[in-house]
Image: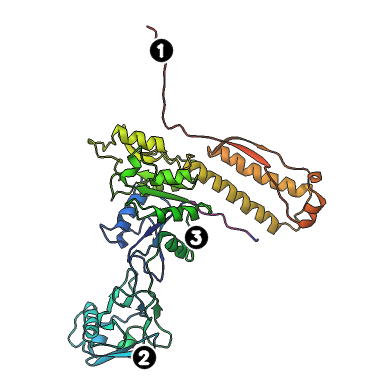
């Protein structure tokens, strides 16, 4: 049976500049069980910890997307390396040949592995032979190095400073067992992978490149959370505004808490009327309230959990006053006036206040609307694919009305809406030209009333004794 796939809403993309994501892969999908594969005390490990560290059910996945803030040199990825020490030890006068895309060729000779006792000794010998080269025709090869990447692959990388403008490199294969190329897994023509260098990219450029590898994520967070130059973040927000996704920004710039300044990130996004970008202010440049709040929010069925006022763990409140890391009253007032979110601790709970996007509507309701739209679209498509005839008739209109009712009723159960009204057209409402075109346009056929959150409570009353 032909069927479109329902989109996932519980995956986060984290754009981060890290070697944990090789540039040829661009993405690395992590689950709640993959933390041991990341290096401690790194941005990506700390983000992963906060994202999956919230109590209760965990999100499906965190997608690390490679952000390129420093140029990446060309590289060559070897094949499946033979790590048998005894085999390497037999090589006493080994060699391999490196060629580049400018038709230069350099033979690296004099490789002696006699006496090694562990495979870990192989790479230093390879690197020493490269360093011993004198003015090689492949510029920079004497500063190139072999190393294992985050995926356990042996990679020959050209030196830092090279980028996409430099020639690519490769190691010539050998079909002879016991030779250096053969043991590097380069046993036949085409073995191994040449990877082009990569220039420095903007946030938007890296995001666009990541989407060539996967579009299976709903929310996006970015490593950058400091500085008052918002050009790249605004460009990324503009792109996401055109998609059925959302962004969570963290802003640590003092302009956010200055009531006299209107050029901070939240104010700019608000002025642009963006409804897919949410800003959280914090004074702590190495804290990850976005990871914590997103991890708590995304795991729930769309519409059922509020983004703000859900207890979080492993994250500081946004200020630095006292044991509860309070913001000053002046700073809180500025953030409230601008509509910017911040983290607060009260009654033993730490949470985001309030959980609204830059435009001032709830992140939860934006997600709920995306869920409602996409699921209706999938079911209408599946109706079209699996019925022998779908056309301008009462049966088709009735079937589509049934899809609307199905998801609007579920919307009430999810606490996304309070009520709805469906007003389907009759067949007579379609003109002959509309029917002939084959395009059934159903405009404003239902209206739903949203169910909104209460973030603060002001109560007055009287007690008579």
Q: Are marks 2 and 1 in contact (CB under 8 Å)?
A: no
Residue 143 x %, y %? 25, 80
Which residue is under mark 1?
Answer: 462
Between disc 3 and disc 1, whose residue precedes? 3
Residue occupying the point 46% across, 40% down: 305
- Region in magenta: 3-9
Query: Gap between marks 3 and 1, in whole Å?
Result: 56 Å
- Is 159 included in the stretch rendered in magenta? no
Residue lying farthest front? 260
Between disc 2 and disc 1, whose residue precedes? 2
- Is 4 included in the stretch rendered in magenta? yes
- Local packing at callout 1 (Cα closer than 10 Å; few below 14, some 14-19, many 20+) is few
Q: Classify 53 as above or below 334.
A: below
Q: Are marks 3 and 2 in contact (CB under 8 Å)?
A: no
Residue 122 x %, y %? 24, 81
Residue 304 x %, y %? 49, 40
Q: Which mark is residue 228?
A: none
434 on left or right of 327: right
Mark 2: which secondary structure?
loop
Figure quadrant of residue 353: top left
Q: Are marks 3 and 1 in contact (CB under 8 Å)?
A: no
Q: Which mark is residue 215?
A: 3
Residue 442 x %, y %? 70, 47
Tell me which secondary structure the magenta stretch mostly adopts.
Answer: loop
């Amino acid at each position: 049976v032909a069927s479109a796939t329902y989109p996932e809403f519980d995956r986060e993309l984290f754009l981060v500049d890290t070697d944990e994501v090789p540039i040829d892969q661009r993405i690395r999908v992590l689950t709640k069980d993959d933390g041991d594969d990341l290096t401690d005390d790194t941005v990506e490990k700390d983000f992963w910890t906060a994202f999956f560290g919230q109590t209760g059910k965990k999100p499906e996945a965190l997608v690390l997307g490679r952000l390129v803030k420093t140029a990446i040199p060309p590289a060559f990825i070897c094949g499946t390396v033979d790590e048998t020490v005894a085999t390497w030890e037999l090589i006493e006068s080994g060699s391999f040949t490196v060629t580049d895309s400018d038709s230069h060729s350099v033979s690296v000779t004099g490789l002696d592995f006699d006496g090694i006792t562990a495979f870990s000794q192989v790479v230093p010998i390879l690197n020493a032979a490269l360093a011993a080269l004198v003015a090689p025709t492949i510029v920079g090869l004497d500063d190139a190095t072999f190393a294992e990447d985050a995926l356990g692959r042996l990679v020959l990388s050209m030196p830092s400073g090279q980028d996409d403008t430099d020639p690519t490199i490769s190691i010539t294969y050998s079909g002879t067992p016991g030779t250096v190329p053969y043991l590097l897994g380069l046993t036949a023509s085409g073995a191994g992978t040449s990877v082009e260098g990569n220039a420095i990219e903007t946030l938007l450029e890296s995001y666009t490149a990541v989407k060539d590898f996967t579009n299976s994520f709903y929310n996006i967070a970015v490593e950058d959370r400091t500085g008052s130059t918002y050009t790249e973040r605004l460009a990324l927000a503009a792109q996401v505004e055109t998609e059925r996704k959302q962004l969570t920004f963290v802003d640590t710039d003092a302009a956010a808490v200055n009531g006299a300044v209107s050029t901070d990130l939240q104010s700019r996004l608000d002025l642009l009327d963006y409804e897919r970008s949410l800003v959280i202010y914090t004074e702590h440049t190495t804290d990850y309230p976005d990871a914590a709040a997103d991890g708590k929010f995304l795991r729930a069925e769309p519409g059922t959990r509020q983004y703000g006022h859900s207890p979080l763990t492993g994250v500081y409140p946004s200020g630095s006053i006292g044991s509860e890391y309070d913001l000053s009253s002046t700073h809180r007032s500025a953030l409230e006036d601008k509509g910017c979110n911040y983290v607060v601790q009260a009654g033993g709970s730490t949470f985001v206040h309030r959980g609204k996007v830059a435009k001032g509507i709830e992140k939860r309701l934006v997600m709920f609307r995306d869920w409602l739209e996409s699921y209706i679209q999938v079911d209408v498509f599946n109706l079209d694919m699996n019925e022998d005839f779908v056309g301008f008739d009462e049966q088709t209109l009735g079937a589509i009305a049934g899809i609307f009712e199905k998801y609007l009723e579920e919307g009430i159960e999810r606490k996304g809406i309070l009520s709805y009204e469906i007003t389907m057209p009759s067949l007579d409402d379609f003109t002959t030209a509309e029917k002939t075109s084959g395009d059934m346009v159903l405009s404003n056929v239902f209206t739903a009333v949203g169910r909104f959150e209460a973030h603060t409570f002001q109560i007055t009353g009287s007690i008579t004794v």
